[in-house]
Image: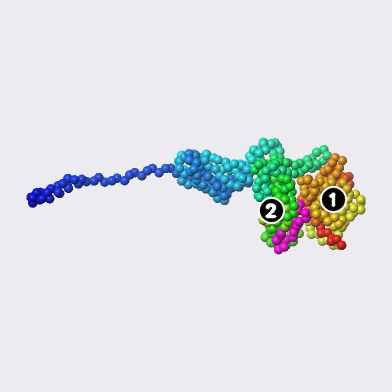
Amino acid sequence: MFRSLLVLMMAVPAVLAAQVRPVAPVRPAAPAPQPLRARIVGTVFDSVATQWLGGATVQLVDAANPSNVRTAVTTANGRFAIDSVAVGTYLIGYFHQRLDQLAIEAPLFRVNITSAEELEVPMTIPSAETIITKRCGPGDPELPMGLYMGFVRAAATNQQVPAARVRAQYTEVTVGPRGVERRYPSRFGSSTSDGFFTLCGVPRNAPITARAYAGADSTGFIELRTPRSGLLVRDLVIGSTNKGTGALRGTVKSMSGKEITSARVVLWGAGGNGANSTNGQYTLDGLPTGTQMIEARAIGYQPMRLVVDIPATDAATADITLETLVATVDTVRVRGDRVSTQMVEFEKRRRAGFGSFIDENQLNARTPMFMADIFRAVPGISIATGQSPQGRVLMRGNGGTCAPAVFLNGMNVPVPDGNLDAIMNSQEVMAVEVYSRTASVPPQFDSRNGCGSIVIWTGARKQRR
């Protein structure tokens, strides 16, 4: 047995040696080929404003897998970049509030990536001419038309208002056999179900007077100017025309940033509501809400008009910067009493017996709230109500009524609809001349419009005794 155990022990190494075999070295697997990755760069340009569009959200969507979306935001100079994009077919587009203002859809572009190279993708908002043609048709190439468009919103809710009426009026001057003639055409439109409106045919690079209304709510009469491109975009906010909840705050400064303490800020059509600035600050309360127009004046500065949106709850803010009045004549020293040269000429014309005249004593006796209140019971004058809550001042004639020419402190100002509250505060009127017959109009106040003239002189009236 000892021999058997010895034989067994001697046989174990041979068995182990027979069972152990050399193991071949394990080779690492070859790395999988990496997919090609490209870089997409580009720009977004606003062709209407002719400037780069910053803050636009650019999205790249995989056409085969729409849930695969890559996003980038354009910088101030309109540039964007999306890195590591796999080979494939994509759709690329962008979103920005500017598209909402223009009521156009975000354009989409197809991108095919076949290599790892950098791909440039420029994108643009369509030009003003393209938008005008799409909205209004081709028009006359010899006389290209303009387009005013925007949304009508409610001051109380800021929601878009359907079926609101929008009106834009402008001056059209023609030269014919009878000389220079002025017409005051109007363009009308209605807002769609989403509050969007378009007014085709307004003039380019010209001022227009606009107003929107729906039911008892409306905007004020505001002045806008169409750009050279012909495309004007400006929303209109309608609100209550009564005094009450509206408020406006702001500062009045010079171009150098200095506060102007002597400025007078007036909200047109607000029943004589105005305020003087104190330490450059002004406050207007109890105003009608909606889109309105204010005017700021100060001695030694150019007057400035500004369109503002006044909400129904919070006070609106409008900071005003006035430019220094550039002297065009030498300084004139005036010596005399309170009666100015203008009032001396006013008295001369009154003594001549042509026309109707209203002086400051008569104005104080009438205590007018609106400009139309000044002209009630004046011969040849008709006060029309309707779209203008303050009343429109028109001339009566054989053919009905028409809008007279208006001269403010000797300067002809366009008031095509007879709404004098759009140019003047009744509390600042010192004297008025009315020439209802064209034959009696003095030469300096004759605009040849065939409808007579109204001459308004402003200043501080004497207090009633």
Callout 2 environment at 10 Å: few (<14), some (14 to 19), or many (20+)? Answer: many
Place of residue 456 in the rendered image (x, y in percent of width and height, measured from the top left): 82, 52
- Residue located at (26% from left, 46% from top): 25
- Look at mark 2 in the image and give the residue it sits on: 312
Callout 1 environment at 10 Å: few (<14), some (14 to 19), or many (20+)? Answer: many
Q: Is 363 situated above or below 64?
A: below
Q: Quadrant of the C terminus?
A: bottom right
- Look at mark 1 in the image and give the residue it sits on: 375
Q: Is 155 situated above or below 111?
A: below
Q: Which residues are magenta?
A: 264-284
The amino acid type, in three-letter code, at marker 2 is Ala
Q: Nearer the viewer, mark 1 or mark 2?
A: 2
Side of 362 where 282 appears, left or right: left
Q: Earlier in the sequence, mark 1 or mark 2?
A: 2
Identify the secondary structure beneath mark 1.
loop
The amino acid type, in three-letter code, at marker 1 is Phe
Q: Is residue 251 visible?
A: yes
Q: Is residue 179 magenta?
A: no
**Residue found farthest to the bottom:** 279
- Residue located at (69% from left, 58% from top): 249
Identify the secondary structure beneath mark 2.
loop
Side of 330 where 116 appears, left or right: left
- Residue located at (83% from left, 56% from top): 367
Q: CA distance from mark 1 to mark 2?
A: 32 Å
